[in-house]
Structures are given as structure tokens and as C-alpha cells.
Amino acid sequence: MNEILAEREVFQAAAACTHLSRSARALYQRLAEASTRMRYLLSQCQVIVRVTEEPSVCRREMTDGQETIVLSAELLSREQRLAQQPVLLCENLDDCDFLEWLGVIYGTQRRLPDRIQLSTRNGGGSTTASVYEDILKAKAELCLCICDSDLKYEGDTSEGDTARALRAAHVLYDPTLACLHVLRCQEAENLIPASILADVYISDVQKLNAVPDLDNIQSNRTHQLWRYYDIKNGIRVFEFVSSANQRYVASWSRVFGGSSDIVEHNCAACAKYRACERKSDCTAYLARGFGSTVLRDTVTGFFTKRSCAEIIRRLPQAIAGEWEIVGRLVWAWGMAGCRMAA
């Protein structure tokens, strides 16, 4: 992960020095060429690490709009994990694998190095905040933590328990060596385009039938409800018409219509008798889901088999913007060889 960086002119001057051997001059010439490239790559990173000779230094600076983590060489030699692959912490490993691919695609699309090197770590769902706390308290490794927001409709400000606990930990402990990013959608699954799922589940009739429901939500430009649709479980009639949250009902009515019309057209038994007393009793879906393995299925069934160009072509405009935000973040933290600036 370590790179020797200096001004290009310094390397060029050394390359022109006749007192050096031919092989040494050739080496400095290659370093001069690599230095320009490395400076450019560093400029693309949102966060870089700079090693200093100052003793006991661990701080964060902002220089020309770019964050720099400044570490003393003494600390780096004592905590060797700091010079190893940064940690990508998510609520589960399926999230890690999917989001790591967004970093690879971001680099490929911009003709940047796409070898993302991150040590993925499973937060265990509700225990993710505890894992993050331990990392912050130890101050022994770089960490990028990405979690779901669990927001359910446009205008929803009630993040899930995990997101709130992570934000609290980020404030309570020193976050110098870490970055916390809460997704601007309910879950990572919301970042999967319907057209990709159509290919992933080409042989699964039940899930293939759910593709038009998702496509209808993702393709509508009058709202941003694609961010809040429960892709894993779908939305049943019961949870919509029985919701006490009128903001939730009003938001999703833009897609499904009024609750009385929904009951009339989607569940005759419910319209007559109000037979369903709980969500599990309801079998009428306003929009169907794809199950809990949808992220894993997307990675293994599409990402690993298609080119990055093909994947990018499948992105709806709305989702493409969110892919860029997340992809750039993951790429920057996973860029091997560009993390340390001496």
C-alpha cells in the first residue's frame, strides 16, 4: 500500500544526473512518470492518508477540498493493521460484496484502477454498531462503514435502529480513522435495477413476475419511491391500508392509488369482510418482492458474468447517481497503492 511520492521535477532531475548509473537514472525516470499518475489518482480519492515524521500524530485535515488522515510513522509501525487493507463494515457480507462491486464499476467507468482491496467484515445486523464501536475505540485500522437507512417513504426521517446506533457511536468515539455512510435509500437492495433482476431471475417465474412491479416504481420520474420500496419482501395490501402513518399512505398512494380502491381491486375478501387481522394473513401484493438473497443473486448471477460496460448500460438515470456516490466512496477507501502519501 505504500508509495514513494515526490514532485515530478525531483525525479526528473535525478534521472538526468550523470553521476548515477544508467539503471538508477532509468528508475528515477519511471518514478517521474508514475508520480504524475499517482498524484492524479490521489486527487480522485475523497480521503488519503499521509505519513509524517511528527511523533504521536493521528488527525484529520481538509486540504483543497480533500480530506487527509495524517498518521505518524511511529504509530504506523506500532499498529501495522493501519498499513493493511481498510475494513469495509456492513450489516452482512452480501451487502459488502455488492457495494464492493460498485467501487470496481466506478473505477472501470472512469478508467481508474479497479482493483479494490478491502477487508470485508460482517456486522451481524443489529450488532453492527457494536462492531463499529470496537473499531473506533481500538484506533488500529482504517474503516469504511456503510449501512441501510431503513427509511420507508419520501419524507421519512426515522432511520432504523442500526443507523441511529452507528451515528451515535460515530459521535461518541474518535472517528479520525473511519467513515460512516448511511445509504440514502431503505436498503442496499434498492440500488439494483429491475432490468438486471430480469436477467438474474430469467428461470424463476415467480420472481420474474415481480420485475414489472419494481420497474414501474423505478421508472417513474415524478417521485423517488424506488429508494424506499421493500425489494426483499414487497408491499402487501394489508400493511398499506392498515398503516396508521398517513404520510406513508399518502406517499405510496402516488404509485398504488387510494386505499379504498386498492382494497376493492386487490382483495375481494378483504373488501367484504376485512378478514386479514395481521400482515402474515394477507396474500394480496401491491408489489412483490425478490427474497432475502437478491444481493447475492445479483453479484453471482450478473456482476460476475457481465462486463462493467454492460452493467452500466442497465442503470436507470435515478439510480445511476446513487451508484456514483457510493461507488466513489468505496473505490477511494479500497484503492490499493494510493492510500499512503509520504
Image (tube, grey):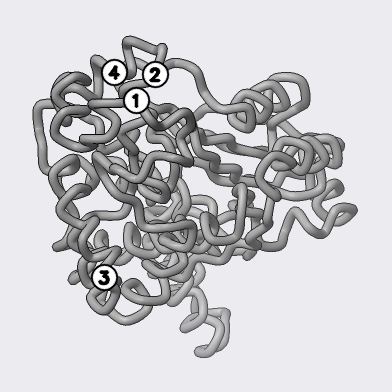
Disc 2 versus disc 1: distance between alpha carbons? 14 Å
Q: Would you identify the image quadrant in which residue 161 lies?
A: top right
Q: Nearer the viewer, mark 2 or mark 1?
A: 1
Disc 4 versus disc 3: distance between alpha carbons? 38 Å
Residue type, numbered disc 3: Cys
Q: Nearer the viewer, mark 4 or mark 3?
A: 4
Disc 3 versus disc 2: distance between alpha carbons? 41 Å
Q: Residue furthest bottom?
A: 22
Number of residues whose C-alpha sits closer than 10 Å to that of mark 4, classed few (under 14), some (14–19) or many (20 or more): many
Q: In the rendering, at what x and y percent does residue 286 appear?
A: 24, 39
Relative depth, front residue between 17 and 335: 335
Number of residues whose C-alpha sits closer than 10 Å to that of mark 2, classed few (under 14), some (14–19) or many (20 or more): few
Relative depth, front residue between 326 and 44: 326
Q: Which mark is residue 249?
A: 4
Q: In the rendering, at what x and y percent does residue 253 appear?
A: 19, 22
Residue labelled with disc 2: 243
Tell me if I can see residue 8 in this picture. Answer: no
